[in-house]
Structure formats: structure tokens, C-alpha cells
Amino acid sequence: MVKLCDSAPDLLATMPPHQALRAWMGRFIDYATAKLGMADALRALVESGVNPYAQSHEMMPAALTSLLDASVKAGTIRPDITATDMFAALTGIALASGKSEQREQAERLLDLTMDGLRTAVR
């Protein structure tokens, strides 16, 4: 988890904010997939009402907030999305498509999520 969260600044330093966010989202799914049985464990914890990341409750929001804030500042995503919203969306994708054989589906869901985050063209 630390490696995942610590990757946010590096991604922001090497690519545009919205691309850094999308890359980080992919890494989140990689992390979830790499953990044997993590999707099942997440599902059980979420259903029980327990926060599966209570011990790292500061790291995850900080990483997500930095990525979201940079993307909002760049004008590429909506300003009304919180780190908590994003974590819920990513957890849902991990639960639905967290197995390695479901990676293509996870990628489509991540792209769909990014489409929903984009600012409206008026």
C-alpha cells in the first residue's frame, strides 16, 4: 500500500495530471489483483461495514487528493469528486473485476470512471 500511495507524486511529475490519475487507478487495481484473495477479502470487509484500509486511512486519501487536486487545477476533471468518492469507485471496480483474468474489464471500468470524471464541454 505504501508503494502505491508513494507513486502518486512520481506520476504527477512525469505526466499530465489526468493521465497520472488514470495510471494510478490502474496501479490500484494491480495492487488489488496482486493480493491473493484481496477482492474476496475486500467484499467481506465492505459488507461487514469495516473500513478495509483503516490502518492506512491517511495515505490513501492523501494520494488520491493530490491526484484529484492536480487534475481539477488543470481543468481536466470535475471539482466535486472527493478522495472518498474515488476510493469507493476503485474499491467497487476491484471487487467486480479484481481477478487477473478480468483485467480487460477492469480497464474498461477505469476508462468509464475517467469519462465520468471529465469536465463537461459546454
Image (cartoon, helix red, strand yellow):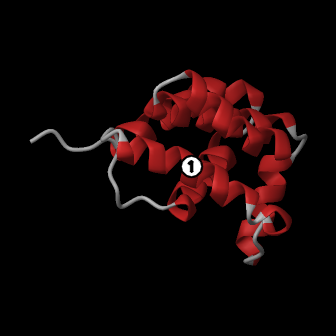
Q: Residues within 10 Å of mark 1 (few under 14, many from 20)?
A: some
At a point 81% along the width and 53% down the height, the residue shown is: 40
Residue 7 pos. (x, y %) = 72, 35
Task: Tell how many labels.
Answer: 1
Q: Position of residue 10 (x, y in %)?
A: 67, 30
**Identity of the residue drawn at 75% across and 66% down:** 57
Mark 1 lies on a secondary structure that is helix
Q: Is residue 118 left or right of residue 109?
A: left
The single residue placed furthest to the right in the displayed view is: 36
Q: How far across and how far down the image is residue 78, in percent?
A: 32, 51
Residue 62, percent across and down?
Answer: 65, 56
Q: Is 37 placed left or right of 45 in the picture?
A: right
* Residue 1 visible to the viewer: no
What residue sits 48% from the left and 48% below the top? Answer: 68
Q: Nearer the viewer, residue 77 or 36?
A: 77
- Residue in the picture at 68% in, 49% down: 95
Q: Is residue 73 above or below residue 9?
A: below
Residue picked out by circle 1: 66
Quadrant including the C terminus: top left
The three-letter code of the residue at mark 1 reads: Ser
Q: Quadrant of residue 36?
A: top right
Quarter holding residue 14: top right
Of all residues, the one furthest to the left in this rendering is: 122
Q: Residue furthest front?
A: 13
| 2 horizontally vs 26: left or right | right
Q: Is residue 53 visible?
A: yes
Name the residue at the bottom extreme.
49
